[in-house]
Image (spheres, rainbow, N blue to C red):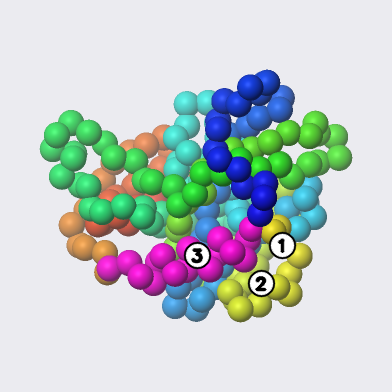
Amino acid sequence: MSYLNHPDTAAAGDTADTHHLTASAVVLDVTARRVLLVHHLGADMFLFPGGHVEPGEAPHTTAIREVAEETGLTIDLVSPTPDLTALYGMGMTPAPMPFLVARMPAPVWPDSVQHEHTDFLYLATGDSRAPLTMQADEVGSIVWAHVNELHRLNIRAEVEYVTLAALRTLTASPTPGVNTVNVVSGNARVGIQAGVINSNQHR
């Protein structure tokens, strides 16, 4: 995991060709102890679902959108912060906090230039019983992998470590509250429940 460097998003020498901003999600079914992974055709390995941040798009919106596009799944982002809903009454709109921000080599397609990503990785929950729809031009397969079986898959180096850390974080969290505040951000509607971001993706 030595390539998980400090997340300098504007390092010396960066250009639009050599450095991209991305967002992804560690999607867990906590009860089933399973994590959602996609087989990335360019990298030829299983990764967390995610993709490039579009111009004007917030990273958490990207993560929600990319999971929906690649797998058809609607997810709930879980922000690892206290309940900050009172800030809405103070003229502030708190955004979900990523679980990890890391700079790393990007998966390389045969016709692409070697470059790096700074990835905003979010915690999320989903239902492993829900139907999935594969984005066939980028994804070879989708799997809800049991956390104890990750070593059996061809995964990128950080996937198992980050998955287990995310599971520990989610299982240590208090039960979300019931009061919600809805806010529209990009193409995703989110509601904050004591740190839980519920998405209703516009299709």
Prevalent SS, magenta region:
helix
Would residue 138 be seen by someone viewing this image from the given angle? yes
Would residue 126 be seen by someone viewing this image from the given angle? no
Quadrant for the N terminus in the image: bottom right
Q: Secondary structure at mark 1?
A: loop
For the residue marked with disc 3, what is the amino acid? Ala
Q: Secondary structure at mark 3?
A: helix
Farthest left residue?
89
Q: Marks 2 and 3: which is nearer the front?
A: 3
* Residue 12 lies in the magenta-colored region: no
Q: Residues within 10 Å of mark 2 (few under 14, many from 20)?
A: some
For the residue marked with disc 1, what is the amino acid? Ile
- Residue 165: mark: 3
Q: Please provide percent x and percent y for residue 103.
A: 61, 40
Are the residues flagged by discs 1 and 3 in contact, CB closer than 8 Å? Answer: no
The first of marks 1 and 2 along the sequence is 2
For the residue marked with disc 2, what is the amino acid? Leu
Q: Which residue is mark 1?
A: 155
Q: Which residue is mark 2?
A: 150
Q: Residue at x 45, y 52 (%)?
A: 99
Query: Which segment is the magenta one?
Result: 158-174
